[in-house]
Image: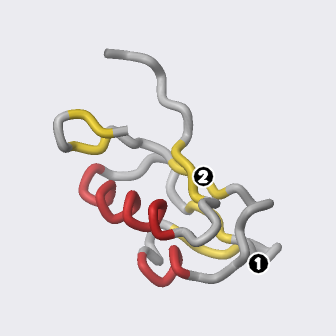
Amino acid sequence: MERGGIYNMKKVKVNKNACISCGACAAMLPNVFTFGDDDKAEVKLDVIPEDLQDEVMEALEGCPTNAIVEEALDKAA
């Protein structure tokens, strides 16, 4: 979801059924991703700060199983 070159992503989640615990996301952004008790990646932040959105999008795009997904955003124009 890109508008005018700026990512409008505000939230992401990890699909734990798809996560293979490779650690790429947590290695790239340890302040955003961690591992839960089930050894699957989790998102630490409720809302992704604007200054981290590009890096989070890189992690999302780099996930080998596409387990990191954007949360539904409200349809405000």
- The quadrant of the rendering that contains the C terminus is top left
Residue 49 location, x and y as percent? 33, 52
Compared to residue 33, the image places residue 68 above or below, namely above
- Per the model, the C-alpha gap separating discs 1 and 2 is 15 Å
Amino acid at circle 1 = Asp
Q: Residue at x 29, y 44 (%)?
A: 7
Q: Give residue 2's mark.
A: none
Find residue 3 and report its image quarter.
top left
Q: Looking at the picture, tell me which residue is in the foreground, 36 or 2.
A: 2
Residue 37 location, x and y as percent? 79, 75
Residue 42 location, x and y as percent? 64, 64
Q: Is residue 10 left or right of residue 67?
A: left
Compared to residue 54, the image places residue 8 above or below, namely above
Q: Secondary structure at mark 2?
A: strand
Q: Residue at x 47, y 22 (%)?
A: 74
Find residue 58 and report its image quarter.
bottom left
Residue 69 location, x and y as percent? 56, 50
Find residue 76 and report its image quarter.
top left
Q: Is residue 13 left or right of residue 9?
A: right
Amino acid at circle 2 = Lys
User: In the rendered image, which residue does mark 2 sit on?
Assistant: 13
Q: Secondary structure at mark 1?
A: loop
Q: How many residues crowd mark 2 within 10 Å: few (<14), some (14–19), many (20+)?
A: some
Q: Is residue 55 left or right of residue 23?
A: left
Compared to residue 75, the image places residue 11 above or below, namely below
User: In the rendered image, which residue does mark 1 sit on?
Assistant: 39
- The quadrant of the rendering that contains the N terminus is top left
Q: Is residue 28 left or right of residue 77?
A: right
Return the disc, 1 or 2, that comes first in the chain's sequence.
Answer: 2
